[in-house]
Image: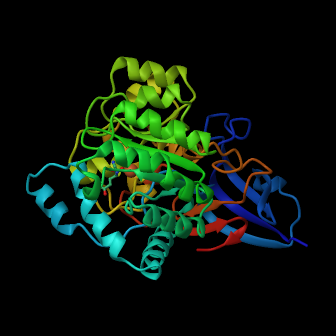
Amino acid sequence: MSSSTVITNIATLVTNDPSLGDGSPLGLVQDAAVVIDGDRVAWTGEASKAPATDNRVDAGGRTVLPGFVDSHSHLVFAGDRTQEFNARMSGRSYTAGGIRTTVAATRAASDAELEANLTHYLAEALRQGTTTFETKSGYGLTVEDEARALRLAARHTDEVTYLGAHIVPPDHADDPAAYVALVTGEMLDACAPHARWIDVFCEKGAFDGDQARAILTAGRAKGLHPRIHANQLSYGPGVQLAVELDAASADHCTHLTDDDVDALANGSTVATLLPGAEFSTRAKWPDARRLLDAGVTVALSTDCNPGSSFTSSVPFCIALAVRDMRMTPDEAVWSATAGGAAALRRTDIGHLTPGARADLTLLDAPSHVHLAYRPGVPLVSGVWRGGVRVV
Ligand code: NIG
Ligand code: FE
């Protein structure tokens, strides 16, 4: 039998349910309470009207919001790229080629080392309020190493993405077509049982539009749903391909033409922005305002990986999005919760409507705006995942 808990004395409750509270997209309720029953939200509303429960937690006038949904990370890796980061901060530019360093280290690592690394960064993310994360393969790039990465990831999340098409590995440099055949053939067969999604890095120096279409189409035929690394380092076909294939998300979206923005606005593909990557590669910011004004659904995620964005902190990404990408604090918080859920085509997370999964983050602040207003400050003081307090 499940027991019920009320979290009460919440100054600001972000529900992401516009039918609740102030009627804004964040569905803000002041002086609020949430009731958790088992792994679900049972009730949300004004504290004075909360039903009786078995247990009571006093939020002490702080903020509660849905747990962050980090819909894009690369956490199955070994090694470190401090030197590459140092060189970049001394003026060198970022290229896809750095991925090879991590591929070599990942192939050389044992299963135990890879899983210890993965759980280390997951714990780090959880302490910062992330209750759902997606993660990818992409640093193995052999049949065995890709399948192993996905097997390890699947022990920790349902949102697992096959990214055999991250780059053409050095062992196939002379024959990229043979590598695409491997990714769409034997490697796909070995990987599909462990993954929900298929991704491709569609970029100069990685895979072109035709290769990306072939890879994602082959994945779809094996029951994987597409998502794409698109238009990160340069203009290209990735975003329009994403919409054409009904990918759940086009990720990065840093270099967009008006046609790209129109395609996103008229399709059901979410634009996932990853400001940690622009921060850590000292690149130009994606124009979130342009996407939002066109009516595109925007998600915000970390892209946590050892090369281009070595942060597991969604609050940091929210602060960057507000300061440098012209998102309002409300928009950024929505994108990091409900937006991430949309990018994973999940309806059970990213909001606190009764019936939703009880994934909640407690902030030591009177409102969610403090996530951007107090950058770099560890405001997360409690996390519930599936109704269980884990932080
Ligand atoms: O999302 N863009 C491709 N993949 C990663 C970078 C991976 C790396 O540099 O190791 C990204 O930024
Ligand atoms: Fe990425």
Rendered-image quadrant of the N terminus? bottom right
Q: How is the image coloured?
A: rainbow
Identified at 22% across, 53% down, the residue is: 97
Residue 228 in the figure: left or right of residue 179: right
Identified at 56% across, 48% down, the residue is: 197
Identified at 64% across, 45% down, the residue is: 223
Toward the left, the furthest residue is 90
Dividing the picture into quarters, in which one does residue 344 lie?
top right
Rendered-image quadrant of the C terminus? bottom right
Dividing the picture into quarters, in which one does residue 158 lie?
bottom right
Q: Is residue 16 above or below residue 256?
A: below
Residue 308, image x, y percentages: 29, 55
Q: In this view, does 358 lie above or below 390?
A: above
The image shows a total of numbered marks equal to 0
Give the camera-side residue of 370 and 307. 307
Identified at 49% across, 74% down, the residue is: 119
Say if residue 274 shows up in the picture: no
Q: Is residue 71 above or below residue 59?
A: above
Q: Is residue 228 above or below residue 110?
A: above
Give the camera-side residue of 377 and 80. 80
